[in-house]
Amino acid sequence: MQDCNKNNILMLSNPVAITSTADSLLSDTAIANFQQILKTQGYLYLERLPDDFDHLVFASKFGVLLPHKYNGEYVFTIKVNPNLGDRYPAFTTSEVEPHTEGYEYEHRPLHYQCLWCVSPATCGGGQTLLADGYAFVNSLSNEEREYITVYKFEFVTPSGSIVKHPLYDVESGKQPIVRFNFSQLRRNSDRTLNNIATRFLQFFNDQKIAINWSKNDFLIWDNFRMLHSRTTYQDRDRELKRVYLRA
Ligand SMILES: [Fe+2]
């Protein structure tokens, strides 16, 4: 597994993050650079940002903010919450399996997801993991890629209803959308689908990068492209903030 060590931003972009002021990170030049990194590798991770950094303003540079359905607000707290944890593992201390956000939507999912760290898990767990879904699709045979593009498959939503989508949703002229959640994808006796889904899970485990959160770190990824998951943790004070964006 490739770790995102504390120098990673220096390898991914111009060395502006660690020594820069909050204002300079929001300059037109810096934003254009960050947008290019996001487009190229599917995610952008900035570490140990200054305390006065405005994560929400920064997030808004990458798309249009979407209000969360739970509270109508742009910024949603990701912390242990028994009320939501019954339905969504993100609000427990448990592992979260690899998935794309909004796989359960009838409509198009959100395009970008942002997280930033208010309080990391002191136990060292609670890593966010990412892997490139487009890279997996590109590794498939033409027949397999056509199979997951042409056919619609059944996803079970957290409320138990069913939505139907391709795994690789290609509308002409638009950016393809990967949808995935292994345990919620009904495979039944479909051996082809089961084979591809199992390999997708293995691909994630082989290729994932790990985000080791520190206070103020910021992460944004392309949810049409990347799968994400989370490792388990014990510290119930761990707190991240989440923002959804459309392009
Ligand atoms: Fe998620």
Image (cartoon, rainbow, N blue to C red):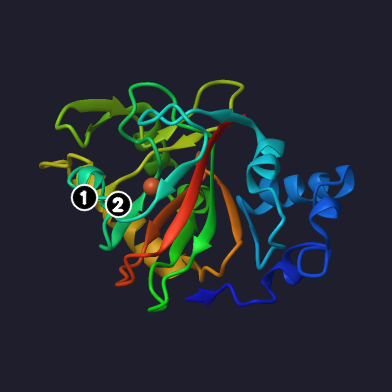
- Drawn side of residue 237 relative to residue 56, left or right: left
Q: Furthest-left residue in view? A: 189
Mark closer to the observer (1, 2)? 1
- Drawn side of residue 69 relative to residue 173, left or right: left
Q: What residue does disc 2 label?
A: 91
Q: In this view, does 63 lie above or below 140?
A: above
Kindly state the secondary structure of the residue where label 1 is placed. helix
Q: Which amino acid does label 2 sit on?
A: Phe
Give the x, y percent position of residue 235: 34, 71
The tag on residue 196 is none
Q: How far apart are marks 1 and 2 (CA)?
A: 7 Å
Disc 2 crowd rating (10 Å Cα; few below 14, some 14-19, many 20+) is some
Q: What residue does disc 1 label?
A: 82
Give the x, y percent position of residue 110: 48, 32
Dividing the picture into quarters, in which one does residue 32 lie?
top right
Name the N-terminal-most of marks 1 and 2: 1
Q: In this view, does 78 lie above or below 3?
A: above
Q: How many marks?
A: 2
Residue contact at pointers 1 and 2, CB within 8 angstroms: yes
Pointer 2 residue Cβ closer than 8 Å to ligand 1: no
Residue located at (29% from left, 50% from top): 197
Q: Is residue 211 above or below residue 102?
A: below
- Drawn side of residue 193 relative to residue 207, left or right: left
Give the x, y percent position of residue 236: 32, 65
Q: What residue type is labelled 1?
A: Pro
Closer to us: 191 or 43: 43
**Is residue 213 among what the camera can see?**
yes
Give the x, y percent position of residue 77: 43, 47
Kindly state the secondary structure of the residue where label 2 is placed. helix
Residue located at (83% from left, 60% from top): 21
Residue located at (17% from left, 39% from top): 186
